[in-house]
Amino acid sequence: NAGVTQTPKFRVLKTGQSMTLLCAQDMNHEYMYWYRQDPGMGLRLIHYSVGEGTTAKGEVPDGYNVSRLKKQNFLLGLESAAPSQTSVYFCASKGGAGEWRVFGPGTRLTVT
Amino acid sequence: GENVEQHPSTLSVQEGDSAVIKCTYSDSASNYFPWYKQELGKRPQLIIDIRSNVGEKKDQRIAVTLNKTAKHFSLHITETQPEDSAVYFCAASEGYSTLTFGKGTMLLVSP
C-alpha cells in the first residue's frame, strides 16, 4: 500500500515549457486535490476532483489544467510555465465523507 | 469563501513548556477543523482534528479547542519536545470538497 505518490519529485522548466505532474493513490479514494505551497502562504488549492471524470477549480486555478480519467490518478498540467509557478506542489486524496486528507510527498518545481 | 487567519507566524519555546497556536475562520458554515504538522522537506500530516459538534479534543500531549460563537480554534501542545519543532497548519472546511489552510506557524522547541 503505497498511499499517495507523486511523479516527478523535482523538475526544472524554462519559461514557456509545458509539463504534467502525476498523482496516484491506491486507497480507492474518491476525492483528490492539487495544492501549491509557497513560503509564508500556506497551502493553496489549485484544482480538485470529487470522483472519476470530474474536476473543479480551487483558489488559484489560473495557468493549470487537470484531468481525472482514472479514479486512482489525478494529473496536473502546466501548458506554458511561468516563473510565478515555481513552488512545491502537493497532491492529496480523501476517502468518504469525514475522512482526513492524505498528502503525497510533493514535487518541487522551478521555472527559470 | 472561507478565510483562515493563524497566529503567531513563529513561536519559540523551551523544552517542557506549553505551546498554543490560534486560528480564526470567517465562514460560520465551516464544521471541520484539522491541524497538520509539516517537518522540513516533508509532507503535511494530520495530527488532530475536531468537528463543530465538539468543543475540545485531546490526544496525549496535543489538544484542540473550538469556540464556534467566536469562530476560533486553538492547538495546545504540552510538555514540548525538540521533535515537536515543525510548521503547524490549521484549516477549516464547510463541506467535504475543499479545505482552507492558515499560513502556518513555525514552532521551535529549544533543548
Image (cartoon, rainbow, N blue to C red):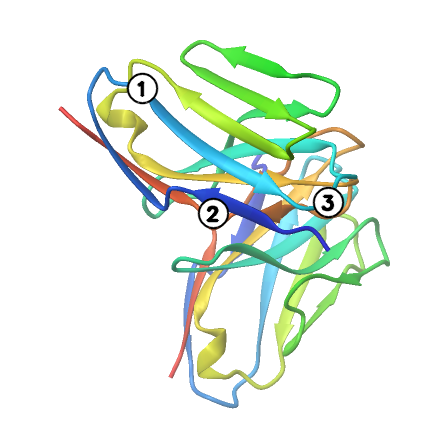
Q: Chain of mark 2?
A: A
Q: Residues within 10 Å of mark 1 (few under 14, many from 20)?
A: some
Q: Quadrant of the N terminus of chain A?
A: top right
Mark 3 sits on what residue? B27
Q: CA distance from mark 3 to mark 1?
A: 29 Å
Q: Point out the frontmost of discs 2 and 1.
A: 1
Label 2 secondary element = loop
Marks 2 and 1, how far apart at CA: 29 Å
Can you name the residue that lies furthest to the top here?
A: B60
Which residue bears the numbered disc 1? Answer: B18
The residue located at (69%, 29%) in the rendering is B69
Residue B17 lies, in percent from the top left, at: 25, 18
User: N-terminal of the two: label 3 or label 1?
Assistant: 1
The residue lying furthest to the bottom in this view is A16
Q: Position of residue B19 (x, y in %)?
A: 34, 25
**Same chain for the residues under marks 3 and 2 in the image:** no
- Type of amino acid under label 1: Ser
- Location of residue B105 in the rendering, given as x and y in whole percent from the top left corner: 38, 42
Q: Quadrant of residue B10?
A: top left
For the residue pair B44 and A28, the one nearer the viewer reads as: B44
Q: In front: mark 3 or mark 2? A: 3
Q: Chain of mark 1?
A: B
Farthest residue, direction left? B111
* A20 lies above or below B108: below
The crowding category of the residue bearing disc 2, from other C-alpha atoms within 10 Å (few below 14, some 14 to 19, many at least 20), is: many
- Which residue is the site of mark 2? A105
| Disc 3 residue crowd, few under 14, some 14–19, many 20+, Cα 10 Å | some
* Lateral position of residue B52 relative to residue B110, left or right: right
